[in-house]
Image: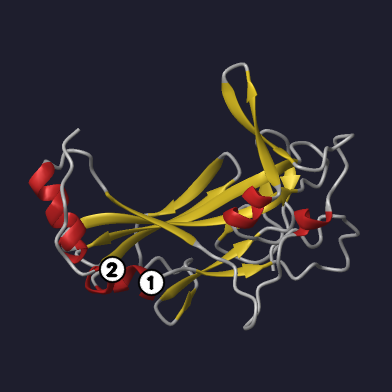
């Protein structure tokens, strides 16, 4: 594989991606509705770095498997750090971002040009959220470690479409001006479901039927 050295100041390069941060989705975490009576209250995001510090790698049949430093003795056991961190003005939780071309046929020169001038190309920005624990209302599919994401397709720095991840599927809005997309200024607003962390474009009780029927709660 040929390596290409980019001769550009890091801060100057970051400025070229300012449109990605300007349009970053605003996510509402569930307010823990008191009328649900469910245990899924309080499973918030955290950082991957903090998660790695609390896990260890094991070689299982030639595969690297992460397990918790403190062993779990049954499927329903939960550790204190599974609840993550409640974001606030004083406590920040990272959103991880990948920025990719929206097609794979770029040659080497075009790829370098895209990196240096992303506002002249079509790119996809993936905004990734990490949760240390995923809790499902019916106990089906509870698991340690959960990634969710929202994606925006840009054309020359202008947003064109929005995608939200929902369990094993998702919802694509191929028109940025779709009236169903709520916005705070220029930023799209999304809602993270209680416990399951599916991402929706509205607050309420969305229904999802794969792999089992689930009523999510967003607010």
As drawn, the residue found furthest toward the left would be 109
Q: CA distance from mark 1 to mark 2?
A: 7 Å
Would residue 124 be visible to someone looking at this image?
yes
Looking at the rendering, which quadrant does residue 154 occupy?
Answer: bottom left
* Residue 146 on image: x %, y %: 63, 47
Q: Which residue is mark 2?
A: 17
Instruction: Choose between 217 and 136: the one closer to the eye.
Output: 136
Q: Which residue is mark 1?
A: 21
Q: How packed is label 2: few (under 14 Cα within 10 Å), some, or many (20 or more)?
A: some
Instruction: Choose between 112 and 38: the one closer to the eye.
Output: 112
Instruction: Choose between 8 and 153: the one closer to the eye.
Output: 8
Q: Of helix, strand and loop, which one carries label 1?
A: helix
Instruction: Say if mark 1 contacts mark 2, CB within 8 Å.
Output: yes
- Image quarter where the C terminus lies is bottom right
* Residue 166 on image: x %, y %: 58, 48
- Image quarter where the N terminus lies is top left
Vertical comparison of 36 with 2: above or below: below
In the rendered view, how is the structure colored?
secondary structure
Q: Identify the residue shown where x is 40% and y is 65%.
A: 178
Instruction: Choose between 154 and 61: the one closer to the eye.
Output: 61
Would residue 209 be visible to someone looking at this image?
no
């Amino acid at each position: 594989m040929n390596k290409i050295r980019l001769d550009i100041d890091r801060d100057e390069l970051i400025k070229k991606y300012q449109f990605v941060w300007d349009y970053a989705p605003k996510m509402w975490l569930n307010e823990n509705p008191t009328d649900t009576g469910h245990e899924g209250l309080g499973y918030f995001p955290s950082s991957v770095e903090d998660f790695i510090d609390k896990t260890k790698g094991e070689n299982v049949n030639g595969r690297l498997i992460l397990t918790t430093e403190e062993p779990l003795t049954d499927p329903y056991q939960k550790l204190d750090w599974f609840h993550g961190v409640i974001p606030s003005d004083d406590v920040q939780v990272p959103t991880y971002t990948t920025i990719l071309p929206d097609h794979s046929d770029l040659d080497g020169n075009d790829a370098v040009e895209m990196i240096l001038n992303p506002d002249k190309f079509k790119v996809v920005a993936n905004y990734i959220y990490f949760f240390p624990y995923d809790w499902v209302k019916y106990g089906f599919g509870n698991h340690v470690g959960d990634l969710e994401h929202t994606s925006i397709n840009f054309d020359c720095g202008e947003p064109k479409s929005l995608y939200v991840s929902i369990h094993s599927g998702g919802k694509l809005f191929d028109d940025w001006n779709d009236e169903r997309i709520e916005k705070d200024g220029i930023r799209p607003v999304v809602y993270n479901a209680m416990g399951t962390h599916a991402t929706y474009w509205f607050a309420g009780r969305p229904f999802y039927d794969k792999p089992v029927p689930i009523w999510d709660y967003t607010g």
